[in-house]
Image (cartoon, coloured by chain):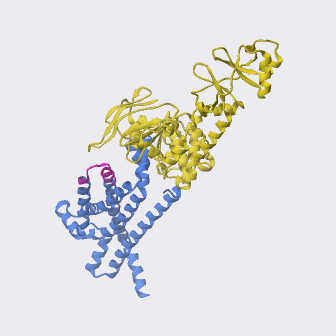
Amino acid sequence: MIELRKVNKVYEDGTHVLKDIDLLFESGKINVLIGPSGCGKTTTMRLLNRLTEHTGGEIFIDEKNIADFNPIELRRHMGYVIQSIGLFPHMTIYDNVATVPRLLKWDKSKIDKRVNELLELVNLNPEQYKKRYPSELSGGQQQRIGVARALAAEPATILMDEPFSALDPISRDQLQNELVRLQEDIQKTIIFVTHDMDEALKIADQIILMKDGRVVQKGTPREILTNPANDFVREFIGEERLKTAEPLPSLSNFIDPTIQAIHLSESKESVIKKLMEQQCFTYPLVDETNQFLGQLSLQKIMNESSVHLEDFVDPSVQALTTDQDIEDVLEYLEKHKHHSLPVVDNENMFVGMIDMKELFRSVRSVYGKRGGN
Amino acid sequence: MEFIRNYFEFWRDRYPSILEYAVQHLIMSALSLVIGILVTIPLAILLTRLKRNFLKSLVFNIANVFQTVPTIAMLALMIPILGIGMKPAVTAMFLYSLLPLLRNTYAGIQSIDSGIVDAAKGMGYNSFQSLIKVELPLAMPYIMSGIRVTSVYIISWVTMAAVIGAGGLGGLIISGIGFNDKNLIFTGTLLAIVLAVATDLLFARFEKSRNRTRRKTI
């Protein structure tokens, strides 16, 4: 975990490029610093491996102040990827990837093994590429090597400074996907600088939007999209992308209140009659104070000899609550193949059944607004 | 035919002394080149590390001034300081070599993409490691071409060194003028040209072989 507390950077000529930056980069997450050029995003990243020194505030890596580290040692334990030109053109792919392990004086056999491992990790055949020079590789392949080189000495943190911005759109897309996939295995703390909002939305766990040396907003891509802090953020994200984030209406809009729950006091026969009339397999059961007790199951009613309605409740059916996130509800419905579910409020009072017809109509219209047709 | 036979006889009679002059010539050239390289490359590296532009332009201007002094004047100026012979001649040649060597080395290091140097630093190379492993190898083509050009200049200029009694192939030419001996003048000139061309070819070959082992590096 990396923490910045009230970090400031003032250059000798008096330019104040970073103003009271407070940030937290959690371990194992992709943190994307984004903003217009000159906003301080690259400077913020470069503070972490002390390529640039901060002039105020404190930076901690796992609770240790980075001012106490030797900068050279610090850098050797932190991966660093920059635009594709960062590979050493006079060294083979092998030598490029082996750079940091060599600086750390690893054994030759250990380095050999690690280089092979890394090239396979980034989908390049070691035998085929090891002895080549960077200029013999395509831009996308070069940047894969850049990533492999940064991972070489197994650093816990990787700094990436617009690593994919010089690539063609297809390679860029591919590398973004690979990074996300790779991150699932390697679980590094990644600090990623970009000016490309699509890229940020695609890969980030946390987006930090900066402007004029300040953090304007930070949060998950979803938080930023659905709840932009101000006009600047809205403008930076762009109308098109905001539209795609058009949220679904909340669950309370899809409740059909006309369905009356069955009362605990009703008789078994009347329940069966009701189920037959409505052609339902299940029905909500409430007590006299309208507390939801569970979902009655027709199958249980038929097979069990009890006369108490509570005994016919199907324990596998959970009620939804009105404040649940609609996206979660959709996922749940899809996974459990329910046709309808009871909804309760925070006090477990029965509110109604989910109105599937209305739900689907709404999903369709939001899909249209998100740019579909 | 008569002329050619005479010329062969001239070589047969004189070749020990001709060779001696040629060897002197080579020694003086090589000596001034090596001293030049030893001084200018560290100096150029130092200049790339300096932040003060004032010092940089001062050094380049001084080197430039040496370059503009006419050869004969430079050699004459050496006499009151270092007397006559090889020492003043090598010193003069060394001063001439400063500018081309300095300029090429400096330009070579400056030409390296700042991203590469940044990457080296960011991965934890210290300043010296970055210089040895990254900057000098990448600047090498520039440095080599500076050395190559300078070596050819020096071989040509050393011919003048005979004026202050330093010997070399210029010695053949000056005796030729004294004795009105066309063979001596021709031989001195020819050998100076051959040495210069051979040196140039040698360096060209060396550069090519380096490029082959590294293939297309940039």
Q: Position of residue A68 (x, y in %)?
A: 36, 29
Our reading of the magenta stretch's main secondary structure is helix
Drawn side of residue A339 relative to residue A253, left or right: right
Question: Which chain does the yellow colour mark?
Answer: A
User: Which residue is nearer to you in this view: A34 or B103?
Assistant: A34
x and y percentages locating residue A336 in the rendered image: 71, 30
List the single residue furthest toward the left.
B80
Horizontal side, residue B106 vs residue A344: left or right? left
Q: Is residue A276 left or right of residue A83?
A: right
Q: Residue at horizontal 35%, vertical 43%?
A: A212
The image position of residue B112, as x and y in percent, is: 41, 54
User: Which residue is farthest bottom?
Assistant: B2
Q: Is residue B26 magenta?
A: no
Residue A108: name its quadrant. Answer: top right
Q: Which residues are magenta?
A: B41-54
Residue A190 seen in the current view: no
The chain displayed blue equals: B
Q: Nearer the viewer, residue A161 or A298?
A: A298
Name the spot of residue B68 as percent of width and height, x first.
Answer: 24, 67
Residue A315: image quadrant is top right
Relative height, residue B51 to residue A311 (above, below) = below
* Residue at 55% in and 46% down: A144
Q: Is residue B44 magenta?
A: yes
